[in-house]
Image (spheres, helix red, strand yellow):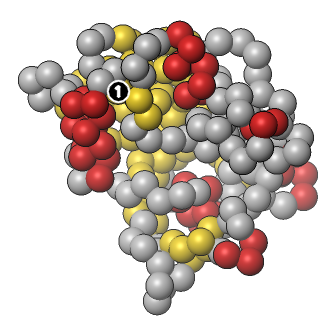
Amino acid sequence: MDDYDPPSEPPVILHQDADLLLVDKPSGLLSVPGKGAHLADCLLARLEAAFSGVLLVHRLDRDTSGVMVFAMNRRAQRHLGMQFERRHCSKSYIARVVGCVAGEEGVIDLPLIADWPNRPKQMVDFERGKAARTGWKVLEREAAATRMRLLPETGRSHQLRVHMRELGHPILGDPLYAEGAARHAERLMLHAEALTLRHPDGGKHVTFRAKCPI
């Protein structure tokens, strides 16, 4: 990641209260610091400088944009962490993928494991992999691409990116799983559009959205 050049504009705040901070993470910005001083700039560090006590709950890949939730206290962090662990929150992504996807909707059920010789890549492994399921729906077909809504039921590393590659339609701009011209889009065409969770104060279901830029 020697070419790390994160966007300079501040992240858009979607919502803030005593327990929650919702942010629209820009593409190209790490969620948390990487190894080395040149990777210190990240969304968490920027938020810590602006919001006292903010705590990490989950992550998005560097090149994925969209909704991230942070906790404003330890109680809320535990509450949210349990929701992610038990899959009590739901996430919706928008992606633009290579080619024309056949069919209108479906589910990809392929277990994933780290591809250790090629880290940070992940791969399908039916013997050792952890369960990974992704629902998908076609939104629009373009001349050489398809716009899709992706609904992950699990939260494995690179899950959507690997599953789309396995479907035969890697996400445009993916430097790890796309090939040829498809990997040279202006950015990874993956956006976390919406996140639904239970509010730590009272348990009411709430949904937060970030406008899709792709």
Q: Secondary structure at mark 1?
A: strand
Task: Please provide percent x and percent y for residue 147.
Answer: 61, 41
Is 22 left, or right, of 6 in this rendering?
left
Name the residue at 76% across, 59% down: 176
Task: Please provide percent x and percent y for residue 142.
Answer: 70, 40
The quadrant of the rendering that contains the C terminus is top right
Task: Please provide percent x and percent y for residue 209.
Answer: 42, 22
Is 117 left, or right, of 182 in this rendering?
left
- Check disc 1 and give the amino acid type: Ala
Name the residue at 53% across, 82% down: 125
Q: Quadrant of residue 20?
A: top left
Q: Is residue 145 visible?
A: no
Taking depth in this image into account, of 183 and 54 the one nearest to the observer is 54
For label 1, the crowd category at 10 Å Cα-Cα, with few meaning under 14, some 14 to 19 and many 20 or more, is many
Name the residue at 25% across, 39% down: 78
Task: Please provide percent x and percent y for residue 136.
Answer: 46, 52
Taking depth in this image into account, of 116 and 15 the one nearest to the observer is 116
Q: Quadrant of residue 43?
A: top right
Q: Which residue was labeled with disc 1? A: 71
Tag count? 1
Q: Is residue 135 above or below residue 67?
A: below
Is 195 left, or right, of 149 in this rendering?
left
